[in-house]
Image (tube, rainbow, N blue to C red):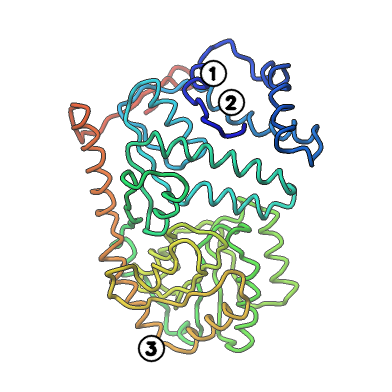
Amino acid sequence: MLNQNVEWDSLFDLFRRKRISLNELLMGEDFLQIAVEVYQKRYTQIMFSDFLWTLRSMYVPLFLVMKMEIPEADVYHCMAAGYAGIIGSMASYFYGSGLLLSEHGIYTREREEELIRAAWLDGLYKDIWIEQFRKMSTLVYARADAVISLYAHARELQIELGCPPQKAGIIPNGIDVARLEGLQEKTEEEQDSIYVGAVLRVTPIKDVKTLLKAFGNAKKMVPGLKLWIMGSVDEESEYASECMELVQNLEIPDVFFTGSVDIREYLGKMDFTILTSISEGQPLTILESYAAGKPVIATDVGNCRGLIYGEEGDRFGKAGILTHVMNLDEITGAIVELALNPEERQAYGENGYRRVRARHRIEDMRHAYRDIYKKFAQERSLDWTEEPFYIRKEGEHGRNRS
């Protein structure tokens, strides 16, 4: 609890005992005494009862994860730090197996951002949760044989958070570029309008409300604008309903919520796309826009700056417009600028297309991970095969499923 030389292996061994009861542990006298000691050393300015229940709620998911039965494998690949990293670290400890971590968003930083914005959590309680997530990330950084991020700044953050530099590598996101080439473009009747596409989940972290307000402002200056919001409206349905109500209340015409769709049916008709997120990693939606030859407006989060302006050694040129997060005037101005400048849209789209073909192809990403897996196999003297295999389990009514 005080983050002093956490004996993770002892904890893993403890929770592997079949008879351990989480209820008896968290409601028992030992846990209470530990909580009292930690409270007296560090948290006396808050109510003890609230502190105690915060600890219990924090440790329930962690302890449940540590009670899991994990199948034995040669290598474990965690797709995030946090709880996934706990599982991978625990499995590596029990079986002596290889451990690989891929972070497409820096887990600790993402949890920090969420907690800082959380209205239901106050003051020191946010610090308690943030410290807990840092502890979990520190564990998997220490135990992993290799830690992969998507771009240079993400790697720097991992090192800052405790990842040994020699473990930290970069494999950029990749997409199937050919899948998004040759899409159906606008018809002759549609040429008079400017189509704007937003490929996103309608959730608060995508800041759809600022997008809608900016589009509404821009449409007053460029009446021919039309906006398609392509993505799930079910993940946070209350927020999605608020966004749709905002469109009605502000009387913004020509806004279409498509729900989840095959973007290939829409992307070819877009003049440009837009992403107003509060937090991102290396957005696939930007790469998909580039593959379709479309420029992008994006907020300065994650790797959006690098994707729009290029990373070190990239000479392809600017591929869109970068704005500050939640800056209504900047986002409005960017929409108007691209709407009124077809030559600029064309040039940015071509730059993005060249960038994605050179640096973000799915084939390159696959080869990079294949090389890592091969290295794991070689180091452990394991046979390497790329033959497909199937795992069968008995389903309902005794039928086998693959």
In which quadrant of the rendered view does residue 370 lie?
top left
- Binning the other alpha carbons within 10 Å of mark 3 as few (below 14), some (14 to 19) or many (20 upward) gives few
Query: Spatial distance from mark 3 to mark 1, Cα to Cα?
Result: 63 Å
Place of residue 60 in the rendered image (x, y in percent of width and height, measured from the top left): 64, 28
Q: Earlier in the sequence, mark 2 or mark 1?
A: 1
SS class, disc 2: helix
Q: Which residue is mark 1?
A: 15
In which quadrant of the rendered view does residue 216 lie?
bottom right
Place of residue 274 in the rendered image (x, y in percent of width and height, measured from the top left): 50, 71
The amino acid beneath tag 2 is: Phe
Query: Spatial distance from mark 2 to mark 1, Cα to Cα?
Result: 7 Å
SS class, disc 1: helix
Q: Earlier in the sequence, mark 2 or mark 3?
A: 2
Place of residue 193 in the rendered image (x, y in percent of width and height, measured from the top left): 51, 84
Viewer-side label of 2, 3? 2
Query: Spatial distance from mark 2 to mark 3, Cα to Cα?
Result: 57 Å
SS class, disc 3: helix
Q: Which residue is mark 2?
A: 63
Q: Which residue is mark 3?
A: 343
Q: Nearer the viewer, residue 136 or 364?
A: 136
In the picture as drawn, the residue positioned furthest to the top comes out as 19
In which quadrant is the N terminus drawn?
Answer: top right
